[in-house]
Image: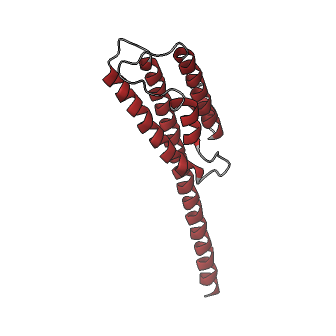
């Protein structure tokens, strides 16, 4: 009877160990999945913002297309902010509000022109500097989240 009890204790300990490992793997997978979603949303925001800046100063583009591009920027920024909040649960060293950072360096700096309003002389330079700032924020985010090679297109 003593051997049966010892075997039961060993089996129980092994079962507990397997459960702990499975839970740890599940949590790591969930964190990685949310990180990938955040990185994807970041790249979508960057692409939408760059497209908007390119269309904004092009007189050949109808105003409706510029408005749609502007709306896409806001939608992609909201998606980025939502997924970023989830990722912050796993890494408390991340900055508090990436949305504010993106807004201030990007969409607020380059507002939507009114229909018929011609872009100013500085708009091209402002657009390029906003693109550069946005690209830097997104690149920093990719590095901060620990996936610089895949995120920055360096392989893997």
The quadrant in which the N terminus is found is bottom right
Give the residue drawn at x 57%, y 16%: 125
Nearer to me, 15 or 155: 155
**Tag count:** 0
The quadrant in which the C terminus is found is top right
Asked if residue 52 lies left or right of residue 17, the reply is: left
Residue 59, placed above or below residue 131: above
Q: Position of residue 74 (x, y in %)?
A: 43, 36
Residue 20, placed above or below residue 139: below
Asked if residue 117 lies left or right of residue 7, the reply is: left
Which residue is situated farthest in the right direction here?
93
Nearer to me, 25 or 13: 25
- Residue 156 visible, this angle: no
Q: Position of residue 63 (x, y in %)?
A: 33, 21
Residue 127, placed above or below residue 141: above
Give the residue drawn at x 54%, y 36%: 103
Give the residue drawn at x 35%, y 22%: 115
Asked if residue 155 lies left or right of residue 82, the reply is: right
- Residue 54 visible, this angle: yes
Nearer to me, 46 or 129: 129
Q: Please identify the quarter of the rendering in which residue 2 is found.
A: bottom right
Q: Position of residue 40 (x, y in %)?
A: 49, 36
Give the residue drawn at x 59%, y 70%: 16
Q: Please identify the quarter of the rendering in which residue 17 is found.
A: bottom right
């Amino acid at each position: 009877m003593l051997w049966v009890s010892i075997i039961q204790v060993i089996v129980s300990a092994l079962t507990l160990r397997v459960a702990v490992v499975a839970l740890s793997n599940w949590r790591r997978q969930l964190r990685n999945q949310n990180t990938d979603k955040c990185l994807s949303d970041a790249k979508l925001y960057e692409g939408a913002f760059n497209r908007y800046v390119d269309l904004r100063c092009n007189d050949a583009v109808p105003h409706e297309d510029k408005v749609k591009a502007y709306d896409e920027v806001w939608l992609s920024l909201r998606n980025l902010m939502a997924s970023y909040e989830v990722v912050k649960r796993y890494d408390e060293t991340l900055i508090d509000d990436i949305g504010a950072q993106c807004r201030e360096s990007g969409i607020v700096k380059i507002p939507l022109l009114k229909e018929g309003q011609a872009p100013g002389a500085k708009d091209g330079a402002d657009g390029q500097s906003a693109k550069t700032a946005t690209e830097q924020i997104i690149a920093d985010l990719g590095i901060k989240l620990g996936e610089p090679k895949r995120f920055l297109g360096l392989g893997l």
